[in-house]
Image (cartoon, helix red, strand yellow):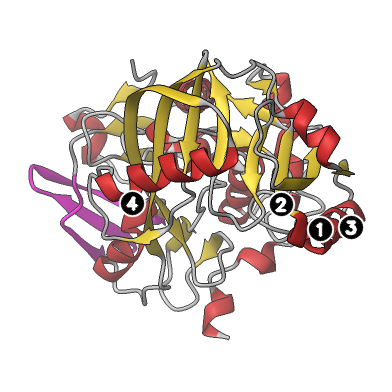
């Protein structure tokens, strides 16, 4: 159940300070960070927030995931996720074959130099972590500090925080038009409209579409389809088995509630819509599982897909549009938007409100994530 006040006609009659388009993890977390200092409206196209990417994430917290440019956001987010009790420890393991030894070693050295607790494992060590691992897998990069994330718990935390601070939510409001109305934006959907001084584009896979409606240049934020399959296996996966990636980024798997979640780590270009898994991608996931583990598949129990949206440089986009006044980007958060949500939302709120940095964000370089980097 959504823990946030639904917008009434009276609410919508008065201009808001900030209107955020999209009530997934991005929009909800930013609303929570802004609502104590501004009057905030969340605009959501679906019947409930978090229906698309947020609600379909097999989320984890792993420092190396997303690359060096995302690492500072991931590291800065850990403290709050941990204090909220939303992390369950699960190590991360990236595995390679005999010919990948040098690549695994470089992977370890590169992230160790960035402060990640990561170690090089040999065949015996990775086989202890992942029983039934096929013999061609020889090396691993082991990250002891990883964790699973309670995605629904984090999303509801932010929705509740936003509610307590006075934010309201408009559901079933698929944005159809955006225009300037004097000092305000006017945002239209089929059954109504609202005015706001600042418009935040937190629309995920729809971010470029929203930008175009607001008269801004799209940034090339591309929706990519990711598939996940839930398997019942023989043997059942050990509960403490690591989240395991292939060094070629062509699969990952992890245990969950006695089952194994497997993804072919696909990034198939798609369009923004209610995406469904393709049978070919499910077959590829199963094939890659079979090349990694000597286990029997007893049943394919579930399959689903979600959209990840990346900017061209695969870094997130936080900041004011360089050409359109009053438009703020909070998008392009790929597959790392859950694990970086606390630091990303705090940084974006500080940029949006002109507030000073704090302990969570003081080490973050906002220019790295600014939309103006594409204009340059």
In the image, 163 versus 246, the foreground residue is 246
The mark total stands at 4
Residue located 19% across and 41% down the image: 173
Please determine whether, in this image, residue 219 is positioned above or below residue 97: below
Residue that badge 2 annotates: 96
Left or right relative to 125: residue 137: left
The mark that comes first in sequence, 2 or 1, is 2
The mark that comes first in sequence, 4 or 2, is 2
The mark that comes first in sequence, 2 or 3, is 2
| Label 2 to label 3: alpha-carbon separation | 15 Å
**Which mark, by number, is residue 109?**
3
What secondary structure is found at the residue carrying circle 1?
Answer: helix
Left or right relative to 367: residue 323: left
Q: Position of residue 53 (x, y in %)?
A: 39, 41
Circles 3 and 1, Cβ within 8 Å, touching? The answer is: no
**Which mark, by number, is residue 101?**
1
| Label 2 to label 1: alpha-carbon separation | 7 Å
Q: Position of residue 216 (x, y in %)?
A: 35, 74
Left or right relative to 205: residue 161: right
Q: Quadrant of the N terminus?
A: top left
Badge 2 crowding class, 10 Å Cα cut-off, few under 14, some 14 to 19, many 20 or more, is: many
Is residue 240 part of the magenta span, yes or no? no
Of badges 3 and 1, the one in the foreground is 1
What secondary structure is found at the residue carrying circle 2?
Answer: strand
Give the residues in magenta. 174-200
In the image, 307 versus 163, the foreground residue is 307
Which residue is at the far left?
A: 191
Residue located 39% across and 48% down the image: 284
Residue located 55% across and 16% down the image: 235
| Label 4 to label 2: alpha-carbon separation | 51 Å
């Amino acid at each position: 159940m959504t823990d946030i006040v639904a917008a009434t006609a009276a609410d919508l009659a008065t201009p808001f300070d900030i209107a955020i388009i999209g009530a997934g993890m991005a929009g909800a977390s930013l609303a929570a960070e802004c609502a104590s200092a501004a009057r905030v409206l969340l605009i959501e196209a679906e019947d409930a927030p978090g229906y698309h990417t947020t609600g379909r994430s097999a989320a984890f917290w792993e420092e190396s995931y997303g690359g060096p440019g995302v690492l500072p956001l991931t590291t800065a987010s850990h403290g709050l996720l941990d204090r909220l009790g939303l992390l369950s420890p699960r190590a991360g393991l990236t595995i390679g074959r005999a010919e990948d030894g040098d690549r695994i070693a470089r992977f370890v050295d590169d992230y160790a130099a960035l402060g990640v607790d990561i170690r090089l494992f040999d065949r015996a060590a990775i086989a202890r972590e992942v029983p039934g691992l096929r013999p061609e897998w020889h090396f691993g990069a082991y990250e002891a500090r990883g964790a699973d994330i309670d995605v629904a718990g984090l999303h509801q935390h932010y929705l509740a925080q936003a509610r307590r601070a006075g934010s309201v939510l408009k559901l079933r409001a698929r944005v159809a038009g955006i225009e300037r109305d004097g000092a305000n934006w006017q945002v239209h959907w089929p059954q109504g409209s609202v005015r706001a001084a600042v418009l935040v584009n937190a629309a995920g896979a729809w971010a470029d579409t929203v930008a175009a409606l607001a008269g801004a240049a799209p940034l090339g934020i591309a929706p990519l389809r990711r598939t996940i399959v839930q398997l019942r296996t023989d043997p059942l996966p050990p509960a403490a088995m690591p989240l395991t990636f292939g060094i070629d980024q062509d699969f990952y798997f992890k245990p969950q509630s006695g089952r194994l979640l497997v993804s072919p780590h696909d990034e198939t270009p798609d369009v923004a819509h209610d995406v469904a898994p393709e049978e070919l991608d499910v077959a590829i996931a199963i094939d890659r599982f079979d090349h990694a583990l000597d286990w029997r598949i007893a049943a394919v129990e579930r399959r689903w897909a979600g959209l990840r949206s990346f900017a061209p440089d695969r870094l997130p986009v936080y900041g004011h549009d360089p050409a359109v006044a009053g438009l703020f980007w909070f998008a392009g958060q790929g597959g790392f938007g859950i694990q970086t949500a606390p630091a990303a939302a705090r940084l974006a709120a500080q940029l949006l409100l002109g507030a000073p940095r704090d302990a969570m964000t003081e080490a973050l370089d906002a220019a790295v994530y600014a939309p103006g980097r594409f204009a340059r």
